[in-house]
Image: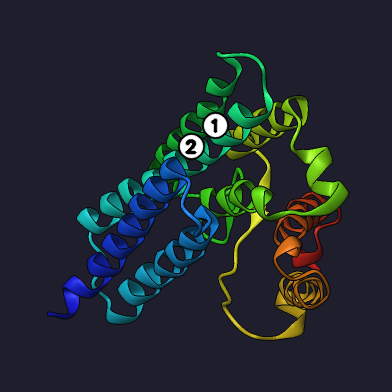
Amino acid sequence: MKRHIPNFLTCCNLVCGCFGIVFCLEGRDIPAAYFVWIAAVFDFFDGFAARMLKVSSPIGKELDSLADMVSFGLLPSIVMYKMLAGVSSSSWLPFIAFLIAVGAALRLAIFNVDETQTDSFKGLNTPSNTLFITSLPLLGGSVSAWVQTDWVLVAITIIFSWLMVSPIRFFAFKFKSFSWTDNKLRFTFLAVSVLLLVFFQISAIPLIILLYIASSLLDGFLGFEKK
């Protein structure tokens, strides 16, 4: 029975992605971002359960990628498509949103064959990308007015699609120990993220993802995790 637990959690991730797509397309009151948050929790715990129960399998790995493609590839593309369609006068421009799905597919394929991504990621991971994209409609005030323009949304689409397949290293939340020396970057990032959530609530999510990108770039130059 226990060998099916990780795959069950992965399927829950997939179902959340499907629900998010339907709710986004039908314009229901519940934002797609809520389903992404739940899917991300299932995505974290399926791998955690597989390692804890020692039941990792090739099928589980492939199933995880297929589920991620729906929840963290297709869903953010549709969210971006809907945003672009709502602000652009062009009939074709919104379709550029599906660069996100292409970037996610390539990112997941690279991850499956690249054995060097154990302590860090090469390219922005798909859950982080999706959290950023799907949280944009939740922004309010002048920031929302600035973001919800076609040229800003197109720029975000192109930049984040590239980040997923870029050679940039992003730190992973895999703790080999809980010492400050080995995890100062992770602990600092988590502390600042909590403060952002306290002060800005949902609007903090895009800021946290940008902080994650900036921290990873800074770590690449200064090597905090190596000191």
Which coloring applies here?
Answer: rainbow
Q: Residue 140, percent across and down?
A: 77, 54
Instruction: Identify which residue, 67 or 81, lies in the foreground.
Output: 81
- Image-based side of 145 in relation to 99, left or right: right
Q: Residue 173, percent across and down?
A: 59, 68
**Quick check: 24 above or below 184?**
above
Q: Tell me what residue is drawn at x 34 percent, y 50 percent.
A: 18
| Alpha carbon separation for disc pair 2 and 1 | 5 Å
- Image-based side of 199 in relation to 28, left or right: right
Q: How many marks?
A: 2
Disc marking residue 81? 1
**Image quadrant in which the C terminus is located:** bottom right
**Amino acid type of disc 2?**
Ile
**Amino acid type of disc 1?**
Tyr
Circle 2 residue: 78
**Quick check: 108 above or below 51?**
above
State the image quarter where residue 83 is shown: top right
**Quick check: 112 above or below 94?**
below
Instruction: Identify which residue, 23 or 154, lies in the foreground.
Output: 23
State the image quarter where residue 205 is shown: bottom right
Label pair 2/1, CB-CB below 8 angstroms? yes
Q: Residue 3, percent across and down?
A: 18, 74
Secondary structure state at the residue bearing disc 2: helix
**Image quadrant in which the N terminus is located:** bottom left
Instruction: Identify which residue, 91 or 178, lies in the foreground.
Output: 91
